[in-house]
Image: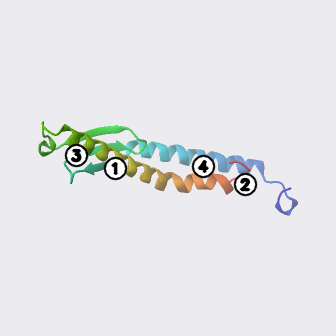
Amino acid sequence: MFPGGQQPDLSQLMKQAQQMQQQLAAAQQELAATEVTGTAGGGLVSATMTGDGDLTALTIAPDAVDPDDLETLQDLVVAAVRDAKRAADEMTANRMGPLAGGLGGGLGLPGL
């Protein structure tokens, strides 16, 4: 049963669904074009990633390179990539969260 015994206006629901789909697509394009940077070792290693998770750059300062200690450099690279991924995930959650949150009650349809 619908609240108040009235059926929802299906054309209005379809319009809302279309608007939300357009907003989500625009947000996804924006995330793909936006870059975030993660760092490790006080900036010795930095990793740049798009909002949709593609690694686009990795920078290693010469001071980070010690031929006798490659393990530390490897750890710094992993830490910088993880930091960039965290920043990308945070940006995605901030951008997509309000849009995705509207799917539950925004259309008034179960499961959406």
Q: Nearer the viewer, residue 63 or 50?
A: 63
Label 4 to label 1, Cα distance in Å?
30 Å
Label 3 to label 4, Cα distance in Å?
39 Å
Q: Nearer the viewer, residue 8 or 104?
A: 104
69 sits left or right of 12 in the view: left
Q: Nearer the viewer, mark 3 or mark 4?
A: 3
- The residue beneath circle 4 is 20
Q: Nearer the viewer, mark 2 or mark 3?
A: 3
The image shows residue 55 at horizontal and vertical percentages of 34, 38
Label 2 to label 4, Cα distance in Å?
13 Å
- The residue beneath circle 1 is 83
The N terminus is located in which quarter?
bottom right
Tell me the kind of residue under disc 2: Gly
Q: Earlier in the sequence, mark 2 or mark 3?
A: 3
Do the residues bearing badges 2 and 1 touch, measured as CB atoms within 8 Å?
A: no
- The residue beneath circle 2 is 108
Q: Nearer the viewer, residue 29 or 93?
A: 93
The numbered disc on residue 45 is 3
Q: Earlier in the sequence, mark 2 or mark 4?
A: 4
Q: Which residue is drawn at the image coordinates 13% and 37% (left, top)?
A: 68
Tell me the kind of residue under disc 4: Met
The image shows residue 80 at horizontal and vertical percentages of 29, 46
